[in-house]
Image (cartoon, grey):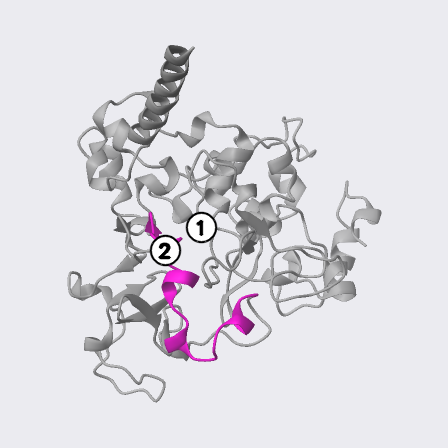
Amino acid sequence: MQMQRVLCWSVIFAGTMLSAVAAPTYVGSAACKTCHAAIYARWQKTPMANVVRDPKEHPDAILPDLTKPDPLVKFKKEDIALVYGSIWKQRYFAKVGDDYYPLGAQWDITHQIWRNYFVADNTDWWVPLYPADNMKRPTGALCDGCHSVNYNIATKTVTEWNVGCERCHGPGSDHAAKPSRATIVNPARLDSVAATNICIQCHSQGQPLQKPINGTYYDWPVGYEPGKNLRDFWQLEEHKLGETTFTHFADGTGHKNRMQGNDFVQSAMYSHGVTCFSCHDVHGTENRAQLLKPPNVMCLQCHGPSSPNGPHAPTIEAHTQHSAGSAGNECVNCHMPKIETQLADVNVRAHIFKFIPPSATVLDKVPNACNTCHADKTPAWASEALRKWPGHSPWRVD
C-alpha cells in the first residue's frame, strides 16, 4: 500500500514537472527567420513590424521637423524614448523609471500639423481611474500590451516591440527547437472564431474581465495568448441601440478607430465563417491595409453577379449604378465607408459590411455611404436618388 502511494505521488510529481518544463516560452521574431526567411522579409516592411521604434536606433523614425517651433510641442528630440505610428498619426513616449509615458503633442501625418494629445474625460472607460496628467498614465498599462510581444506586467519588459510573429502564433520556443504543426499555433488551422479573436485582442474596444490587476487598470487582455479563449480575458464594449457613444454610432457601427473587431462580429461575414485573414495578410502584401488583392478584386472572389452571395444584378455597374473605374463602383466605398474617427477629420473604414442608408443619417445621425462621397449633397437627395435605382426595393432605402 505504501509503495502504491509513493508510486502515485511520483507520477503526479513527474507529470507536474513535465508540464512545467514543456511550457513554451517566447523567443522573438528573429528566431523565425531561419526557416521562414521570405515571410520574415515581407513582415519587416509592414506597419505591424514598425509601429513602435526607438529613434536612437532609427533616426528617421521621427517624421516632423522638431527644429521648427510649435506652441504645442513642449519637448525636445532628446526626450523621445519611443515613437509610435507612421500612417495616420505619430505619438511620442518619454521614459521615466521603468515605464513610458505619452508626451503632449502628436503629429497629424495627413495634414502635416501638430495636434494636442490627451485622452479627455467621457471617452475611454479607464479615464476616470487615472489622473488627468499624461505623465501619470503609463503606456505599459494602457498601450504596450498590443504594441509588443509578451509584455510582462511584473517586470514591465517585452520580448520585442511591435507585432511580432508570436503575437499571433503564441510562444515559439518549442517550434524553434522542433519545427512541426504540433508545436505552434497557426491561426489558419483554428476555427473561425478563435482565429478572428487573435486580431480582435487588439483591434477592438473593450475591457479586461479582471480589473484592476494588482491595483493597476489595463486596457488590453492581460494573460491572453493565441490558442486560449479570448472571452476568458476580454469583454467587448457594450452598446445600446439608439445611443451614440464614444465607441458606437446609434446603429451599433463603430464610432472611432480600433473598432474593427466590434464591427466585424456583428457582420454577416463573421457569422458565415469569414476571418480577418480571408482578406488580409499581416505578413505583408503590396496592397494597402495588407489586403491579399486590390479591394474590388478581393470582394469579387466571393461576390459577383453569378454568385449566390450577390449582388443580384447582371453586372457590378448595374448593382452600383456607377460607372466602372469610378469611386462609386468600389465595393468598399458603399459597404466599408470611412466613417470611424482616427484623428480629427481623418477616418478609417467600418468593418460591419452593411450598407448604411441616408435615412440612418436623418434618424440617428449615422454617417451614410452615399454622402461620404457626395459630401456636397444632402441625405434627402441621396434617398431620392436611391429610389430611382432599378431593381432596388424602396423599403430598403428608408
Q: Are marks 1 and 2 in contact (CB under 8 Å)?
A: yes
**SS class, disc 1:** loop
Q: Which mark is residue 125?
A: none
Say which quadrant the N terminus sits in: top left
Q: CA distance from mark 1 to mark 2?
A: 8 Å
Amino acid type for the residue under numbered disc 2:
Ile
**Which residue lies under the disc numbered 1?**
222
Say which quadrant the C terminus sits in: bottom right
Instruction: Answer above or below: position of 346 versus 203.
Output: below
Amino acid type for the residue under numbered disc 1:
Val
**Which residue lies under the disc numbered 2?**
153
**SS class, disc 2:** loop
In the image, the segment drawn in magenta is 125-152
Q: Is residue 338 visible?
A: yes
**Front-lying residue, 176 or 104:** 176
**Front-lying residue, 116 or 159:** 159
